[in-house]
Image (cartoon, rainbow, N blue to C red):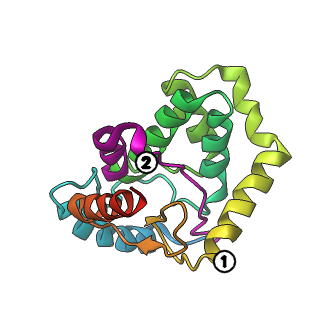
Amino acid sequence: MRLRRLEEEFGDRVVVDWRSFLLRPQPQPRSLEDFRTYTRSWRRPAADEDAGTFRVWATDAGPPTHSVPPHLVAKAAATLGADAFERMHAALLAAYFADNRDITDPGTLQSIWAEVGLPGPEFDRIADPALLDRVIAEHNEAVQAGITGVPAAMLAGNDTPISGALPLASYRRWIERALGAAS
């Protein structure tokens, strides 16, 4: 993932603060065939040299109905620490884009929780109303900032979001300019 690579490259000068943006805030049923057609659009970003793994939806799972469940699981993992969040975030992305798993299905989410080694009883943290409030608040902040899709990135102190899957070099230049201006 590009932003993780930049964190490694820039060390403690760059910290990525992952926030929620709900592409589908409410459950919206759609046919599996329509969803498969939609996932064909993943071919373009998948062709980028520094892209993650993307696969056109080929399973009979899903399709995912809305964005809230995986965001709650990620936030619940974050309550267990940064490492737990990092593992969960990476696993959710892989499950959705590479493995074609329905990450809105409670059973799938609980399986992913176990796969990344998080304590089983702690999965119940997803029911904490404060986590849902946080997900909704972060989504609303993004909308107020003008974000309409993902991926999107903003620099602290800069209220202009950058939308779209940019090449790693573009993100790097953006950060280098910001760090240079801050010096």
At label 1, counting other C-alpha atoms closer than 10 Å, the crowd grade (few under 14, some 14-19, many 20 or more) is few
Q: Position of residue 22 (x, y in %)?
A: 61, 65
Part of the protein shown in magenta? 1-28
Residue placed furthest toward the front? 183
Q: Work out which quarter of the rendered image holds the C terminus and state it.
A: bottom left
Q: Position of residue 137 (x, y in %)?
A: 74, 62
Q: Position of residue 90 (x, y in %)?
A: 43, 40
Indicate the secondary structure of the residue bearing disc 1. helix
Relative to 72, say whether 76 is above or below: above
Q: How far is mark 1 from mark 2, CA to CA?
A: 25 Å
Indicate the secondary structure of the residue bearing disc 2. helix
Q: Determine the image quadrant of residue 91.
A: top left
- Residue 179 belongs to the span the image colors magenta: no
In the image, what residue occupies the spot 26% across and 63% down? 173
Q: Disc 1 or disc 2, which is closer to the eye?
A: 1
Q: Which residue is mark 1?
A: 144
